[in-house]
Every structure is written in structure tokens, then in C-alpha cells.
Amino acid sequence: MSGLLYDAAMIDLDGTLVDTVGDFEVALARMLADLGLPAVGRPFIERTVGQGSEHLIRETLAEAGGAPELYAPAWVRYQHHYEAVNGRHSAIYPGVPEGLAQLRSAGLRLACLTNKPVAFACELLRHKGLSELFEHCFGGDSFERKKPDPLPLRKACEALGSVPSRTLMVGDSRNDVQAARGAGCPVVLVRYGYNHGEPAESAGADRVVDRLDEITLSALVPTWP
């Protein structure tokens, strides 16, 4: 993967760059407490994150025994609590700074592309000292649709000035693979992320790696044209 083959990369955030389950756990527990509902378990959160805040809140309410009508107040309380804890109970995965540096050194322009609301995503990148490595940060509310729809990837490619076939998608779940296939992008998954309780190998990516800094020229060139 060099400037001769690829021009850019789009990198997912939760479960790919940063382990954010701790942030979700605290914010959701506070949200549920405000509504008089019990907290949900960490394994449930790990299986559920990745499809946007709306999906997470609806599924969490159902898991905690809350009525669907509680969604509106739950949304308000969740936004309030998540803003307060964003980045405080999370950690960058090993190999992430090195991996991003390698991609940039190979001449790729980088965008963070996540289903997390863009304000929270950009703040998390700043909090973790990663924001300056990216030219763009796009969230689940940046475009009309979220991953696994391919639209966000196509829009990010436009912003990066690259065509999909020369733009790598790096993520942690089948949502990233489905979106990449629809957009015509090559896709790599990290093995440690939140793939809805399924092994990353089952998602059908072009390659699965243990760490972001394993995404190297020699590892990727033989995998796709």
C-alpha cells in the first residue's frame, strides 16, 4: 500500500482506534439510572455498539426492560452523560499511533469515519491526541445515512479527493465490510474490535490484523488488485 496503489484511508473509531466500552458503560448506566432502570452488562454493550447512538439507546432500553416510549428522554440523558465522560474511561489500542503514522508515511490521506455523532468523535480524537493525524472527521450525523450504507464512504472519498478503489477502509465489524463492499473500497478489519459478538474473520474483509501497525505494504499488496 503506497502512493502508487492507494491514495487515502478511512478509519473507524470505536473498537478500531479506541476502546470506548468504558465510556458507553458509564454513560448508559447514568442514563438508565435517571429513568429508574437497571444498568446493562458490558458484554451487551460490546455486542451492540457500532450502529449509531440511536440504535444503541433503543437496544439498551429494551435490554433494561424500558418502554420504547422512553426513547426521547433517554436520548437527552444519554447525550448529557456521554458528553461528560467522553474519553475519560477509554484507551487507545496498542499499535494505533504507530499504525496511523505508517499509513501517513506511505503517503495516504486519512479520514476518521465513524457512526458516533461527529461532535463526540472529534472531541474523542482531540482528547486522545489523535486528531492532528486526520484531515477529516466524519460521524454518524455527518451524512444522510450511516454505515453499513456505503454513502458515508463515498462522501469521505470525495472529501479526501480519492476514488473508492484507491481508498482503504479500516474497521472492526461487518458494518465496515458491508459499507466498503457497497462503495467499492478494499477493507481491513482489526481482530480486537466490537463485531457484534462475532469473530472478525466471519465478516469477509480482505484481511484481518491483530494491530493497526500490522497494516503494511507487504501485508496488503498481494490481497487485492
Image (tube, grey):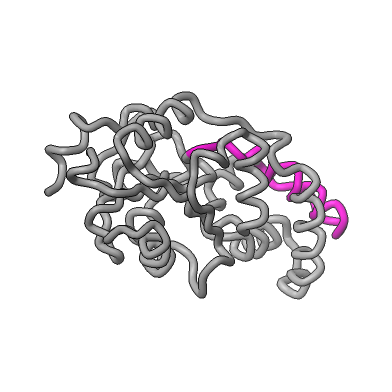
Looking at the rendering, the stretch of residues picked out in magenta corresponds to 17-41
Give the quarter of the figure containing the N terminus.
top left
Q: Residue at x 48, y 29 (%)?
A: 97
- Image: 114 above or below 92: below
Choose between 176 and 131: the one closer to the eye: 131
The reply, left or right, for residue 48 in relation to residue 120 is left
- Image: 170 above or below 54: above
Give the number of marks: 0
Q: Position of residue 134 (x, y in %)?
A: 49, 45
Choose between 159 and 24: the one closer to the eye: 159
Q: Position of residue 80 (x, y in %)?
A: 81, 56
Q: Position of residue 220 (x, y in %)?
A: 21, 37
Q: Residue at x 49, y 71 (%)?
A: 145
Choose between 70 and 130: the one closer to the eye: 130
- Was residue 163 drawn as part of the magenta stretch in this picture? no
The reply, left or right, for residue 124 in relation to residue 189 is right
Q: Residue at x 43, y 26 (%)?
A: 98
The reply, left or right, for residue 109 in relation to residue 72 is left
- Image: 181 above or below 224: below
Q: Position of residue 147 (x, y in %)?
A: 44, 62
Q: Residue at x 76, y 58 (%)?
A: 79
